[in-house]
Image (tube, grey):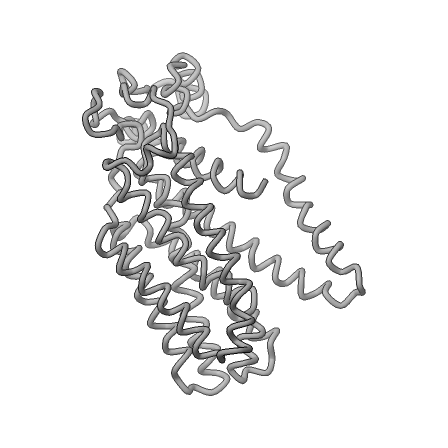
Amino acid sequence: MLGFDYVVSKSLVTEFAPRRYRGRLLSVLAAAWAAGYVAAYLVGFSVRDIGPDAWRVMLALSGIPALLILPLRLGVPESPIWLMAKGRTAEALAIVHSKFGPNVTLPAAAPAAAKKRGNFSELFSPRWRKNTIVGCVFYTCQVIPFFALGTFSPRVLEALNVQDKFVGGLVYNVLLMTGALLGLLIIDRISRRAFLVGTCYLSAIGLAALAYGSFGPVGTIIAFGFFACVLAAAVNLEFVYPPELFPTHLRASGIGLAVAASRFGSAFATFLLPIAVQQLGIQTALGVCVAVLVVGGVVCHLFAPETSKEDLSGVVAEGDTGSRSSTAFAASNAGRNGQ
């Protein structure tokens, strides 16, 4: 169910967002995700010693936020861009007017390509193959070190001779939150491509310094925190960038494939990291994570497109009819109506 949510929530929020606010709005999701991640760490640490049923308590507590948000989700309207893609223009217009005001309009006509049904084979067609590969690679290369080190941060810090595992893990998690907020502040100030490539290389540098430097306990926590902060800022792109890589009829499928690739990678890394630390040593294990980040940076450097100015309602495949300059319903009226 969480996997479904990763795909649908990003697509829905993206298609509702005015273009000039899209990066910041989706980055709010990343900041909220980081806040939940930190909260889960603190709650888990606080209840872990209550007895053999501590895991049951953890799972039960994690259901509370889902129950609290359910009434709000029941009232979420359908995406107007998706409705247009299905030819249901009247319904789309009614939602736009109710949410953005009567002066905000839809494009004159939906692109012809929008009425197509997406399928996975099209994601690997010559038109979209590069975007699909970039989406899968960058997402996977980010989450492998993020989840592997985040899940086992106390064990990693202990292997690095930081004895207070709770403090070390707390610093790591707080800096994750700090990084997410920093990402929120800069997401629309620099290009998506520069943000993507730069954070891959910077987090690799920070992790390499952590793996091969000799800083002592305090210096180790600082290096680990720098890595966490940079990588958490990059997590904003997991919410912003994949939805911008694909047209409406492929967006959910494209995001789903990128999320699936990342989850296989993170599960694999989370399983292997403690084994690697035990069998090969902490430096080798961290070195593999550095290599993963470098691979992600190189692939994005070579192939990642810039998407920050993309008009999501006008993204069409090459050769399709329909205006690429069709303006998204909210963005088209942003200057006139202040939306």
Q: Residue 109: which quarter of the image? A: top left
- The mark total stands at 0
Does residue 10 appear left or right of residue 2 in this picture?
Answer: left
Residue 278 position, x and y percent, is 55, 77
Does residue 267 appear left or right of residue 181 in this picture?
Answer: right
Q: What residue is rendered at 56% in x and 60% in y?
A: 38
Q: Residue 166: which quarter of the image? A: bottom right
**Rendered position, 98 above or below 130:** above
Does residue 211 appear left or right of residue 188 in this picture?
Answer: right
**Rendered position, 150 above or below 193:** below
Residue 276 position, x and y percent, is 51, 73
User: Between residues 42 and 57, which one lies in front from this camera angle?
Assistant: 57
For residue 144, say whether it is visible.
yes
Looking at this rendering, what residue extends furthest in the top direction?
90
Quadrant containing the C terminus in the rendered view: top left
Q: What residue is rendered at 53% in x and 39% in y?
A: 5
**Rendered position, 309 above or below 262:** above
For residue 173, say whether it is visible.
no
Residue 318 position, x and y percent, is 20, 29
Q: What residue is rendered at 22% in x and 20% in y?
A: 322
**Rendered position, 17 above or below 149:** above
User: Between residues 283 and 81, which one lies in front from this camera angle?
Assistant: 283
Residue 309 position, x and y percent, is 24, 39
Quadrant containing the N terminus in the rendered view: top right
